[in-house]
Every structure is written in structure tokens, then in C-alpha cells.
Image (cartoon, rainbow, N blue to C red):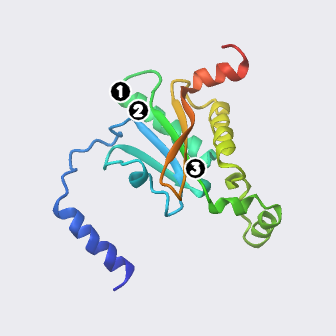
Amino acid sequence: MTILNEFTARNRSFATSFDGAEIPALPKLGTMILACIDARVDPAHVLGLQLGDAIVFRNSGGRVTQAFIDEVAALAMMVAKRTGVDEAAFDIVLMQHTQCGAQAFADPGFQNLIKERIGVDVSPSAIVDPAQDLLGDIGRLCDARILPGSLRVAALLYDVETGVAREIAPQRTLADLRSAAAGTV
């Protein structure tokens, strides 16, 4: 049996009890989760999500990249348009994990090897200290002025050995975080 056969068999089983035809495009929990592509870190399983609960965006390391910022900005505009508000408010949960393979990308020699061989700069995906990297990623969101201040952001660190996701940064709006960074709070 090929992997595609396996997946289509699993899908047939899923489809026999499928009742999600009425699930709206916007997530029920008003949340977008950014997580790593690591197969051990599926937010649906780790956070107990159901179909339609949240938008899940995954990349190497679960890092805030320009592509993620662009997706969030576009989603914010779509939510504002659909809800008829000037500035959309929804939650962004950043979730990194322990024992991340993207820690290898922190090695300058490995970064150079990848850049030389295939022309890809992996440095933005590098994980050095997941908790500190999450705080840095929150800073990237704050610095992205295309994102509305009404967006709320929080961060979790998932431990792949215990299954526990612990809070690294409590939920705050980008406007509050920007004010705090500017010293106006």
C-alpha cells in the first residue's frame, strides 16, 4: 500500500462521519496559531483543537517570518471586511517546542553550507533558546506596522517529552506591546 492509498483510506473513514459542511471559513475561536512543522508538534493534538477552531500556520521552527506577517495582515483585512469593523481583533498564538530541529540552523557553519549548496538562508528559522526566540518573534510582530494594534498575541512553549505547553508570554494586544516598548505605558 502506498502512502497515498493509506491517506485516502483514512479520508474515507473520516468522511463517513463528516459533519463539518457548515463550518465557517473564519475560525470559531478567532485564533491563528503559528507552530513548527515538526511532526511531533501538531497543534490540533497538542491543544485539543477541533475542525474549524483555529487557523494553523506552520513553518520551520514556528518562527515569525515576513511570509507569516503578510498572511496575518491579509487575514486581518479579510476579518475586518467580513465583520464590518475598521480594525480586526483576533488572537495569534506562537508555539515553539523543545528539541527543535531548527536548532541546527543556529550553527553558522551549517547556515553557510545550506546557503552555498542550495541558496537558502535558514538563519531566520534558527532556534537558539525557544523561550527567548518566542519573545523575539513577538517583537517582530510589534515591529510589523502593517499589523493592526488590535491583534492579541501570546506565546507557548511545548515540551515534546512531557506533552505540556507552558505560557511564555501572556496575551496582550500589539498596541499595548508597542506602547510598552516605546515606554508610554
Residue displayed at 50% across by 55% down: 162
Q: Is residue 17 among the parts visible in the rendering?
A: yes
Residue annotated with mark 3: 96
Identity of the residue drawn at 71% across and 59% down? 122
- The picture places residue 81, in percent across and down from the top left corner, at 40, 29
Disc 2, SS: helix
Vertical side of 15 occupied by 30: above or below: above
Instruction: Decide if residue 53 is on the left or right side of residue 173.
Output: left
The secondary structure type at the circle numbered 1 is: helix
Precedes in sequence: disc 3 or disc 2: 2
Badge 1 local density, few (<14 within 10 Å), some, or many (20+)? few
Q: How many marks?
A: 3
Left or right of residue 163, residue 51 in this image: left
Quadrant holding the C terminus: top right
The amino acid marked with disc number 1 is: Thr
Classify residue 18 by image quadrant. bottom left
**Residue 138 at x, y percent in the picture:** 63, 36
Task: Tell me the distance, in whole angstroms, between the alpha carbons under discs 2 and 1.
Answer: 6 Å
Where does label 1 land, which residue? 83
**Which residue is nearer to you in this view: 65 or 98?**
98
Going by the numbered disc 3, the residue's amino acid type is Gln
In this rendered view, identify the residue nearer to me: 69 or 54: 54
**Label pair 2/1, CB-CB below 8 angstroms:** yes
For mark 2, what is the residue?
79
Location of residue 1 (image quadrant):
bottom left
